[in-house]
Amino acid sequence: MQENEEKTRPPIPKPVLMRLFMLFGGGVGCLIVGIFMSKMMGDWVLLAMSVILFISFLAKGFLLKRKINSTQIYKISGVCVSSAPKMFGRYKRIDLVDTQTGGEVSFIMPKKVVFKIGHVYTCYFENNFNDRLEDENNFEGGFFSMSVDLPTNGFLGYEDFGVYQEKPATVTNTPKNEEDKK
């Protein structure tokens, strides 16, 4: 039965997968550098600190993997309509609008994260804020009816799909008889 559940799971999004690799790779890197430097300098405290960092990175990676497996990753998709920096801070406010429902969501990101106005984005968050929003009845099909600031501490990454282009309405004229075809 567990094999069937794994087959029905959606694939891990690329930004979340990269974050997972960075956690595991960072832990292994700390351990390798710690072992090498402690052998070279004879410093056992450095080895102990690198082992602690290795264990911390692995623990955080396994917690993220568990959230991925239990589908606790929250996805927001939409077109960026505003990217305004806060006046006295290191953050900026990002506004995304869902093109299908018209719902809008706002969240605060560090200034170094680049969002271009008019581009389509999918942002991934940990699902630690979803319960609070559903209790307030602001949840509508993946977006919120009101502008709500999402916590950035659960931000996992984003994908940029390029400039938003509306699909033109295609008109199909089907001839009714043989004379209309000519």
Image (tube, rainbow, N blue to C red):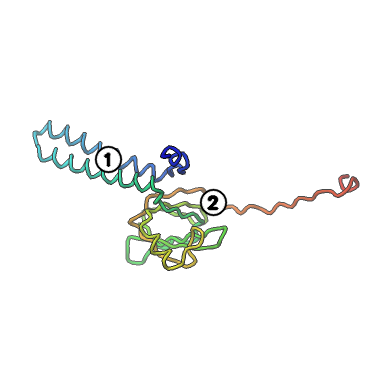
Q: Measured from the top left, where is residue 65 in percent x and y? A: 34, 44
Residue sitting nearer the eye, 12 or 117: 12
Task: Say how many tags the image has.
Answer: 2
The correct choice, above or below, for 167 with respect to 151 in the image is above
Where's residue 87, x and y in %? 36, 67
Q: Quadrant of the N terminus?
A: top left
Q: Secondary structure at mark 1?
A: helix
Does the CB distance between marks 2 and 1 fall below 8 Å? no
In this view, 115 is above or below 45: below
Which of discs 2 and 1 lies nearer the camera? The answer is: 1
Q: Is residue 167 left or right of residue 118?
A: right
Residue 27 found in image quarter: top left
Name the spot of residue 45 as percent of width and height, x first. 10, 40
Q: Residues within 10 Å of mark 2 (few under 14, many from 20)?
A: some
The residue positioned 86% from the left and 49% from the top of the image is 176
* Left or right of 70 on screen, residue 29: left
Give the camera-side residue of 113 and 147.
Answer: 147
Tag 2 secondary structure: strand
Q: Which residue bears the numbered disc 2?
A: 163
Left-right relation of 174 to 38: right
Residue at left offset 47%, top offset 49%: 160
- Decide: few, some or many residues near mark 1? Use Cα within 10 Å; few <14, some 14-19, many ≥20: some
Q: Quadrant of residue 3?
A: top left
Labelled disc at residue 34: none
**Residue type, numbered disc 2:** Val
Q: Amino acid at mark 1?
A: Gly
- Place of residue 169 in the rendered image (x, y in percent of width and height, measured from the top left): 68, 54
Residue labelled with disc 1: 26
